[in-house]
Image: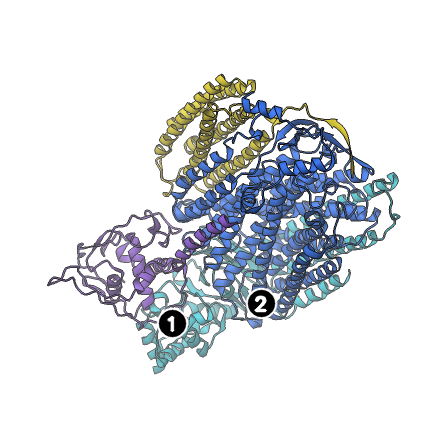
Chain colours: A blue, B cyan, C yellow, D purple
């Protein structure tokens, strides 16, 4: 033992010795984040970073939503001259790219970053500095994309950026490079968070939280993180291949030199279909949490729900080709993908049935979060079923790339993900801020969104069946699509209005909302066992878990464990399956290096679309910041 | 809850009628097949959706007393739920298998190979279609653009290639869509069963003017088709009156010839559509404008006002040059 | 909510090796991500072999000797790597220094040989799709060699500072674990790059 | 957040620098709208001072614009320039990728060459190619010898690989000279 370590031993203070307010004050001091700019740049608190992630993703949601409104206005009547094709193509590309990569994936991870450590009863996420780094990289990637857009360098090749259209010959300038590099940014961030979640769930669960006591939301985001780990590399490979074809003259997608345009589609959809479930799985976790709390009944078929999550995760990798039914691949292969695509309806159906059973046996309490979940049932089931229709090869040859598909996946993504996410905001806002959102505004928000959504997107099924293709910036009057498009635009405006209302509700409630208290909904999971908002160290003492809903099982007092250091960031590492405490794992302290590393990474990515050599010198830059990051600072945390 | 379902049926019915580009308005056995399959799926899936919504509505009644212990469960009840849900899951599986079967059967019929009477090679390019009628006798192959004719009741084979980026060939009333991919060749087959003009459109995003990449299929009686084919094989008629003569001279002296071909004249450009019989087509600029002398002039004088970003450049013409060129082109029946 | 203490964990250690330590699981996670990257790149290679009538495209197969030598070196390195892992777990500082030395030398050698491999490919990345994907596979693995070499060097230096205690040993062990991945991922790539062009 | 702002500013700066490289002028000007450029075919002149040269700057605008350059690259093959000049390597006509320029290597010179035509086979395209497209072709010809910004120069085509694309060719500043090709005929 070195001298420093010895002195640490001397000043070793355990929570066994303390209690009540003093314990909380000391822990808050140990785990707290400095105030001011320095604190903001160096913080590693999963709650602060999770909140940032949430706010940032919602900012991107609103930006992409505005892009959608602009497109709907252009399409409101035939031959409209409001927006030209060049801008329109950038708009729908920005809309899709932002919704998928800057909202859909990160928003689920944002909830996870904030909630998982609370729900599994630990004091910080695993690898907190990686967490801080991932946020900065994500932020820079998103800003990079949108600044490019406002400089008229926004990508205009669709969120799927098919070659050859996005390739070196047909996309001059840097627009397509912007898309490809934004992918790299956001996927690096997304993969980092996924790994943190996986390790947090596997190794940092509170003692006693065996596998069958893990909250369903945690199961959902855990499995989701595994899907991310195996799906996201595909799109990174695809976008890297693309940018290499564009910048250093490789021929991966050039048929004249042995490449193949379909290779891009295979790589992209090998990611692209799991992507849909990456967006959907966290939402199922939110639905489970909300249903259980507001039905006042533990989840019916916990095991079935977990198993169907796993089944969905596996199947989601087996059906990417159903996005390529019109590319002329072998027919028999198509039949297989039809079957697998339809088969995924079984586990999804199973989940729906279990939730309905829970409500059936419970006593539904119709608060706003539950309203959004009911909206989810109504819309998502419809979207899922139209998906079964799309899985049929022959039918797909008719509706593929028409507005029918646009309607379908907005039913799935808005119904399946956005509605539960909005419900989740209403549900956890008290925990995030300590104040309740206005219930009255919430109901207005729900009904406006629900009606607006169905008006906007149901009509698109019809315009699709009337032969309207996707991604057209206008259409001629004699196609008879005008009326339906006008309806869609009106619905879209209602939807937009509902989000304005939502924003107002948030801003207002943050100042004047009713004080929430620890557990306003009388829920059963651990995040409600601590203050709202939680203190920097989450829990004064780490809970000892005896049940799936500890707060329902332990009415009078919560069992906890003691013996952790108070003067030093320490949390419990436990065994993977039965969660026996096995280490007092030190947790990293705030550091500026993740931020610097993110800047270095950003510079590397952006510079590399102007000169391939940036990868080399940028790589060196990143390496330096990483060494600074991992080099021990001689603080207590580093010494065993 | 039932409201949307009824609206669905009504609107879908509406979608079927009075449209010029709809899969619900079939004009070939293939499209009929697809239309039937579509309605079967809609019926089955719609019924399932309704059932789930009803179950949900029932579930929202509140049997359990207020303040009951959320962890308390009734074993017998749970077992019953378990049985029902297992049954439903199995039912879902069966439904899925049945639909897969139906779908695969249709797929087999749809892509069944049949000896074709006419073979047309489609070249998709930004943002128009080139059609080559192939014939064993090379002198009888010919090229046209954005509109092609087929005889009613005869099997047609369409070979699909792309020159630049990926496009997708889609004439909903005749057949499902199929992509045109550079470096690959796809094909589709169909038999048109009633005469008429059917509209199609590019269905894969292909850049700026993806929205204005339409085409027309004219289905006509075999003898009319043969007459049309003979006319297309022949070179352009020399201009009859003086104005069209002036038009031809202007056409040849201007940039037009750099990109366009008019068989029977020195104009041999390969970049733009073949104009040998442009006057005989129903539309202009890939299904964007109805064919008329006025529209020809409007298109030539400012293509970018009509299709911003199109490859046809703006060229300086004085009014009577413009009119004579329009007249000449209109005369190319 | 009132609390009641049910267990005292004061006696637990503050670091562990292998699956005990969260960092090991993190490393495993990154291995999964990169392994997926390798798998997809290799899949793309096979896809291109499949869509092309002949392979390699208008280029002689690469000389396999540099690759074969590297493969043997990597296979040999498994032994000192295992030793390094064991020394770390025993927290034998002197042995760990020695083993990290050896592993660094092996890393430098490997990177040097990798340069000869690029020279021996007989095709540039911008010549045709075969050249492109071959360079990508080789480059992708080269970045892993360099990353682990860098990590090893940093740890080596660290072992001569006052920080060479406790938790750092488990870092050494995780680094050894990562090297197993680097070696394992190379074997299939070696077969793809050097033998598929001869057999296909 | 300040540091983040700084980064953003740098980022914005870097991108805005690239802005005029990214503009897309889809609507070209009609044929007859030619700019007046005073050009010299050779850099030497009688008397002490070099020959008078006046350019409107239109050339720079086209040379630095990725869209114009890529259009030029397409027109180069559409108008069959490679019929005589191949992919720049030269054939019946002189090579375009080297540094030798018989009639001057500035974009204004090249525009003039395309407009007016030159002896021994180079036809005049005035009136045949709209003037802006002549500028685009000329700008592309400049990129063949690496005389335009790399970040704007066209990348490879989806075609057989003749050599590194314009965005990867080494810069060879034009020098007067080069061999007038053996009298070719007008391209068919």
The chain containing the residue under callout 2 comes to A
Q: Dividing the image into 4 quarters, which one contains the C terminus of chain C?
A: top left
Of the pair B218 and D48, the residue shown nearer to us: D48
Determine whether the residue tagged by mark 2 lies in a helix, strand or loop: helix
**Where residue A121 sits: x, y (%)?**
70, 36
**Where residue D138 sits: x, y (%)?**
29, 60
The chain containing the residue under callout 1 comes to B
Foreground: disc 1 or disc 2: 2
Work out which residue is located at the far left of the displayed protein and give it: D47
Is residue A403 found left or right of B186 in the rendered image? right
Are the residues flagged by discs 1 and 2 in contact, CB closer than 8 Å? no
Q: Splitting the image into 4 quarters, where does residue C135 fall?
A: top left
Q: Dividing the image into 4 quarters, which one contains the N terminus of chain C?
A: top right
**Gap between marks 1 and 2 measured at Cα:** 45 Å
Determine whether the residue tagged by mark 1 lies in a helix, strand or loop: loop
Q: Is residue C125 above or below residue D54?
A: above
Q: Name the residue beneath numbered marker 1.
A: B236
Q: Residue at x 62, y 41 (%)?
A: A46
Q: Residues within 10 Å of mark 1 (few under 14, many from 20)?
A: some
**Where residue A221 sits: x, y (%)?**
66, 42
Q: Is residue A315 above or below residue C159?
A: below
Residue B196 has which mark? Answer: none
Q: Name the residue beneath numbered marker 2.
A: A73
**Where residue A294 sits: x, y (%)?**
79, 49
Of the pair C22 and A11, the residue shown nearer to us: A11
Q: Is residue A305 visible?
A: yes
């Amino acid at each position: 033992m070195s001298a420093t370590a010895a002195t640490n031993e001397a000043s070793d203070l355990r929570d066994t010795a303390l209690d009540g307010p003093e314990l909380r004050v000391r822990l808050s001091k140990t785990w707290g984040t400095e105030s001011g700019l320095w604190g903001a740049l160096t913080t590693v608190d999963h709650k602060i970073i999770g909140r940032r992630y949430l706010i940032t993703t919602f900012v991107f949601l609103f930006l992409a939503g505005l892009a959608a409104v602009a497109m709907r206005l252009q399409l409101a009547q035939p031959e409209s001259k409001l927006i030209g094709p060049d801008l329109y193509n950038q708009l729908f590309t920005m809309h899709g790219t932002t919704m998928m990569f800057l909202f859909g994936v990160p928003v689920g991870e944002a909830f996870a970053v904030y909630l998982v450590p609370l729900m599994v009863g630990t004091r910080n996420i695993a690898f907190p500095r990686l967490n801080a780094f991932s946020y900065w990289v994500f932020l820079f990637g998103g800003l990079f994309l949108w600044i490019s857009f406002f400089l008229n360098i926004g990508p205009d090749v669709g969120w799927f950026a098919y070659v050859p259209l996005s390739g070196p010959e047909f996309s001059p300038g840097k627009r397509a490079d912007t898309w490809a590099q934004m992918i790299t940014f956001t996927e690096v961030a997304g993969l980092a968070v996924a790994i943190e979640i996986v390790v947090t769930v596997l190794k940092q669960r509170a003692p006693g939280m065996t596998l069958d006591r893990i909250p369903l939301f945690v199961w959902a985001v855990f499995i989701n993180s595994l899907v991310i780990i195996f799906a996201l590399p595909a799109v990174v490979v695809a976008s890297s291949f693309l940018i290499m074809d564009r910048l250093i003259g490789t021929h991966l997608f050039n048929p004249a030199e042995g490449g193949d345009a379909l290779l891009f589609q295979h790589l992209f959809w090998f990611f692209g279909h799991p992507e849909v479930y990456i967006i959907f799985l966290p939402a199922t976790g939110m639905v489970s949490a909300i249903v259980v709390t507001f039905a006042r009944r533990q989840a019916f078929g916990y095991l079935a729900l977990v198993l169907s999550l796993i089944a969905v995760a596996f199947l989601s990798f087996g059906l990417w080709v159903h996005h390529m039914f019109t590319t002329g691949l072998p027919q028999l292969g198509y039949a297989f993908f039809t079957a697998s695509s339809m088969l995924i309806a079984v586990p999804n159906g199973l989940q729906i049935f279990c939730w309905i059973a829970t409500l059936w046996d419970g006593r539904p309490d119709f608060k706003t979060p539950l309203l959004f979940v009911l909206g989810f049932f109504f819309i998502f089931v419809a979207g899922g079923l139209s998906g079964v229709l799309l899985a049929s090869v022959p039918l797909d040859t008719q509706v593929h790339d028409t507005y029918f598909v646009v309607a379908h996946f907005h039913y799935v993504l808005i119904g399946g993900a956005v509605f539960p996410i909005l419900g989740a905001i209403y549900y956890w806002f008290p925990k995030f801020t300590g104040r309740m959102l206005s219930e009255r505004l919430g109901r207005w928000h729900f009904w406006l969104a629900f009606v607006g959504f169905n008006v906007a997107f149901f009509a698109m099924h019809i315009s699709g069946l009337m032969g309207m293709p996707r991604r057209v910036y206008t259409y001629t009057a004699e196609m008879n699509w005008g009326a339906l498009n006008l309806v869609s635009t009106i619905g879209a405006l209602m939807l937009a209005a509902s989000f304005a209302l939502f924003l107002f509700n948030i801003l207002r409630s943050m100042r004047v909302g009713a004080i929430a208290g620890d557990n306003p909904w009388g829920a059963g999971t651990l995040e409600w066992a601590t203050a709202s908002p939680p203190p920097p160290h989450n829990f004064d003492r780490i809970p000892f878990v005896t049940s799936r809903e500890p707060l329902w099982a332990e009415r009078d007092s919560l069992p906890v464990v003691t013996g952790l250091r108070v003067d030093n960031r320490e949390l419990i590492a436990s065994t993977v399956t039965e969660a026996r405490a096995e280490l007092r794992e030190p947790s990293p302290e705030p550091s500026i290096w993740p931020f610097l590393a993110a800047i270095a990474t950003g510079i590397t990515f952006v510079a590399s679309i102007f000169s391939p050599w940036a990868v080399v010198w940028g790589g060196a830059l990143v390496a330096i910041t990483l060494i600074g990051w991992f080099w021990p600072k001689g603080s207590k945390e580093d010494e065993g | 809850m039932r409201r949307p379902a009824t609206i669905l049926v009504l609107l879908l019915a509406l979608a079927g009628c009075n449209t010029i580009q709809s899969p619900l308005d079939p004009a070939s056995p293939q499209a009929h097949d697809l239309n039937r399959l579509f309605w079967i799926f809609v019926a089955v899936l719609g019924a399932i959706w309704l059932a789930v919504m009803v179950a949900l509505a029932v579930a929202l009644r509140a049997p359990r007393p207020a303040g009951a212990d959320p962890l308390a469960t009734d074993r017998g009840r749970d077992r019953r739920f378990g049985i029902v849900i297992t049954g439903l899951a199995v039912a879902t599986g069966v439904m899925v298998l049945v639909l897969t079967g139906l779908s695969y059967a249709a797929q087999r019929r749809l892509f069944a190979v049949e000896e074709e009477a006419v073979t047309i090679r489609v070249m998709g390019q930004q943002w128009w279609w080139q059609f080559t009628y192939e014939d064993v006798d090379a002198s009888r192959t010919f090229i046209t653009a954005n509109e092609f004719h087929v005889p009613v009741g005869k099997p047609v084979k369409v070979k699909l290639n792309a020159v630049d980026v990926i496009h997708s060939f889609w004439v909903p009333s005749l057949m499902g869509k199929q992509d045109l991919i550079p470096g690959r060749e796809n094909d589709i087959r169909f038999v048109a069963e009633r005469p008429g003009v059917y509209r199609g459109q590019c269905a894969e995003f292909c850049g700026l003017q993806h929205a204005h990449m339409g085409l027309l299929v004219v289905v006509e009686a075999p003898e009319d088709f043969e007459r049309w084919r003979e006319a297309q094989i022949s070179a352009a008629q020399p201009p009859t009156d003086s104005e069209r003569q002036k038009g031809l001279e202007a056409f040849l002296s201007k940039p037009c010839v750099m990109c366009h071909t008019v068989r029977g004249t020195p104009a041999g450009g390969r970049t733009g559509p073949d104009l040998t019989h442009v006057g005989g087509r129903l539309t202009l600029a890939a299904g964007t404008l109805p064919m008329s002398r006025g529209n020809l002039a409007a298109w030539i004088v400012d293509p970018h006002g009509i299709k911003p970003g199109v490859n046809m450049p703006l060229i300086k013409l004085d009014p009577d040059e413009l009119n004579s060129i329009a007249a000449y082109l209109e005369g190319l029946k | 909510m009132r609390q009641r203490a049910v267990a005292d964990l004061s006696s637990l250690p503050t670091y562990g090796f292998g699956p005990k330590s969260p960092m090991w699981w993190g490393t495993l996670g990154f291995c999964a991500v990169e392994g997926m990257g390798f798998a997809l790149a290799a899949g793309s290679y096979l896809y291109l072999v499949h869509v092309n009538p002949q392979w390699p495209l208008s280029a002689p197969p690469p000389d396999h000797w540099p690759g074969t030598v590297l493969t043997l070196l990597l296979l040999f390195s498994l032994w000192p790597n295992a030793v390094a892992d064991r020394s770390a777990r025993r927290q034998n500082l002197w042995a760990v220094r020695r083993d990290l030395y050896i592993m660094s030398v092996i890393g430098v050698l490997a990177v040097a040989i990798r340069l000869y491999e690029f020279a021996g490919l007989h095709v540039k990345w911008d010549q045709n799709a075969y050249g492109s994907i071959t360079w990508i596979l080789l480059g992708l693995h080269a970045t892993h060699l360099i990353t682990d070499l860098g990590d090893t060097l940093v740890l080596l230096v660290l072992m001569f500072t006052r920080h060479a205690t406790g938790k750092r040993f488990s870092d050494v062990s995780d680094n050894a674990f990562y090297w197993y991945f680097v070696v394992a991922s190379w074997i299939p790539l070696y077969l793809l790059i050097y033998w598929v062009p001869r057999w296909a | 957040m300040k540091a983040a702002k700084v980064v953003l500013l740098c980022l914005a700066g870097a991108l805005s620098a690239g802005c005029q490289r990214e503009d897309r002028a889809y609507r070209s000007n009609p044929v007859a709208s030619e700019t007046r450029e005073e050009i010299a075919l050779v850099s030497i002149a009688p008397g002490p001072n070099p020959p008078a040269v006046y350019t409107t700057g239109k050339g720079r605008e086209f040379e630095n614009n990725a869209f114009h350059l890529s259009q030029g690259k397409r027109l180069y093959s559409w108008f069959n320039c490679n019929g005589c000049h191949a992919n720049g390597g030269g054939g019946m006509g002189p090579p375009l990728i080297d540094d030798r320029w018989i009639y001057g290597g500035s974009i204004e010179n090249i525009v003039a060459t395309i407009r007016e035509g030159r002896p021994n086979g180079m036809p005049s395209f005035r009136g045949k190619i709209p003037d802006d497209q002549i500028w685009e072709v000329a700008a592309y010809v400049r990129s063949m010898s690496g005389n335009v910004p790399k970040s704007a120069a066209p990348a490879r085509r989806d075609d057989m690989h003749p050599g590194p694309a314009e965005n990867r060719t080494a810069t060879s500043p034009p020098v007067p000279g080069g061999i007038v090709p053996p009298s070719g005929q007008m391209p068919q």
